[in-house]
Image (cartoon, grey):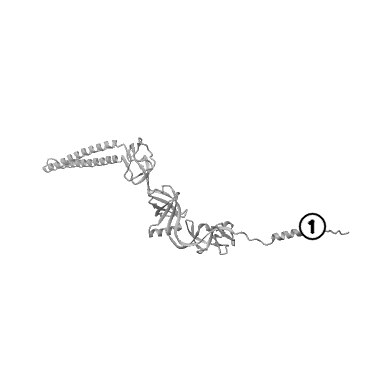
């Protein structure tokens, strides 16, 4: 069989050669990627407070449900709902007229009992002389003396009845048992209230006020130790930004095995009323001071599969990844006990575009 030859046209060879030259020019000289813009700050050394943070709820130092001790018509309410009252201020008045009448009746009964007792005692004294003269028998004298003793007992009972009547009359005026803030009045004037049954209002003592919260049991020994040395400061932060100072006042006597936490309480003077019963607050317990701690901004610390780390900016403006051991965190700063030295610059913003060796540009 005869073989056929194929001739490539010159224009096609020229076109391929030109294309190869163009591609060769494009692939030559790899460009360095641009620097990643970041924000950064230096690690500093300072004293940091050793604190425990928790979320708790405030509660009244004392709460009293006011009930009437006598039955009758609610005649008057002497306060405005939600107002602050002082210990001894009158809160409610129950119609006192029936109880005034009872006092008068008891006073009359006492006078009668005293007269009868006096007569019985006089008779007994006279009878003693008659027995000595033989005018009456000993048995008769014993009966007379028994009647005198009974009359004296009746007098004592009449005195007790008068005391009870006076107490009922006194209880017609219901007084505040402490400095407190009043709640909603549950019964309106004109209604009949029953003794030991009808609830009139609830009083809450809000100055001072308590805050209850839980802490992990791992902090229990440190808290107990701090309390034995003196007052343990506690700060409550409320939603409007105010910080209210107080002190730790109570540690529960058992750890909750279900949660591994223990209930504690702090007391606050709360003179300006910043804390309200039932309100949630962020609580910070200060146990001491960590002296000379290396501190970085909290934003610098990132968490990866191998643990916490930071990007450290080196002198050539590249970054290296440094794994760190963190400790106390407070107010946007965190203590680093290993992995960062004083004066080193750590990245605080722009981490997502970084890897070890990345070139960075620090933004002001």
In the foreground, 303 or 12: 12
In the foreground, 300 or 29: 29
Residue labelled with disc 1 = 12
In the foreground, 27 or 182: 27
Query: In the displayed structure, would residue 83 be above or below residue 49?
Result: above
- 166 vs 145, left or right, is right
Picture mark count: 1
- 206 vs 334, left or right, is left
Q: Secondary structure at mark 1?
A: helix
Q: Position of residue 6 (x, y in %)?
A: 84, 58
Query: In the displayed structure, would residue 331 be above or below residue 68?
Result: below
Q: Position of residue 233 (x, y in %)?
A: 40, 56
Q: Position of residue 285 (x, y in %)?
A: 43, 56
Q: Quadrant of residue 115?
A: top left
Q: Residue furthest top?
A: 190
- 175 vs 46, left or right, is left
Query: In the displayed structure, would residue 230 be above or below residue 64?
Result: below
Badge 1 density bin: few <14, some 14–19, many ≥20, Cα 10 Å: few
Query: In the displayed structure, would residue 317 be above or below residue 56?
Result: below
Q: Residue furthest right?
A: 1
The quarter of the picture where the N terminus appears is: bottom right
Q: Position of residue 129 (x, y in %)?
A: 12, 43
In the foreground, 85 or 223: 85
Residue 284 shows in the view: yes
The residue sitting at 76% across, 60% down in the picture is 17
Residue 216 shows in the view: no
């Amino acid at each position: 069989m005869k073989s056929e030859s194929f001739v490539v046209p010159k224009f096609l060879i020229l076109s391929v050669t030109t294309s190869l030259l163009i591609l060769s020019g494009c692939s030559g000289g790899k460009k360095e990627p641009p620097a990643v813009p970041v924000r950064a700050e230096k690690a500093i050394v300072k004293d940091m407070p050793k604190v425990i943070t928790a979320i708790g709820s405030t509660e009244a130092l004392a709460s009293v449900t006011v009930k009437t001790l006598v039955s009758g018509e609610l005649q008057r309410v002497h306060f405005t709902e939600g107002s602050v009252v002082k210990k001894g201020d009158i809160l409610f008045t129950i119609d006192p007229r029936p109880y005034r009448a009872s006092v008068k009746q008891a006073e009359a009964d006492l006078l009668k009992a005293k007269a009868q007792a006096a007569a019985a005692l006089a008779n007994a004294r006279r009878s003693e002389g008659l027995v000595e003269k033989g005018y009456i028998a000993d048995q008769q004298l014993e009966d007379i003396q028994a009647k005198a003793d009974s009359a004296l007992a009746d007098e004592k009972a009449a005195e007790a009845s008068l005391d009870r009547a006076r107490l009922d009359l006194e209880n017609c005026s219901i007084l505040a048992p402490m400095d407190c803030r009043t709640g909603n009045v549950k019964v309106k004037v004109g209604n009949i209230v029953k003794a030991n049954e009808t609830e009139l209002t609830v009083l809450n003592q809000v100055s001072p006020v308590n805050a209850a919260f839980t802490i992990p049991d791992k902090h229990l020994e440190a808290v107990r130790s701090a309390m034995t040395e003196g007052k343990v400061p506690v700060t409550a932060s409320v939603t409007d930004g105010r910080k209210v100072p107080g002190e730790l006042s109570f540690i529960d006597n058992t750890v909750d095995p279900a949660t591994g936490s223990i209930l504690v309480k702090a007391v606050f003077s709360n003179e300006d009323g910043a804390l309200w019963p039932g309100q949630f607050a962020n609580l910070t317990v200060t146990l001491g001071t960590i002296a000379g701690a290396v501190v970085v901004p909290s934003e610098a610390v990132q968490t990866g599969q191998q643990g916490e780390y930071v990007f450290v900016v080196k002198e050539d403006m590249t970054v290296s990844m440094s794994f760190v051991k963190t400790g106390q965190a407070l107010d946007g700063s965190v203590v680093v006990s290993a992995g960062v030295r004083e004066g080193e610059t750590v990245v605080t913003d722009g981490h997502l575009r970084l890897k070890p060796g990345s070139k960075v540009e620090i933004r002001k």
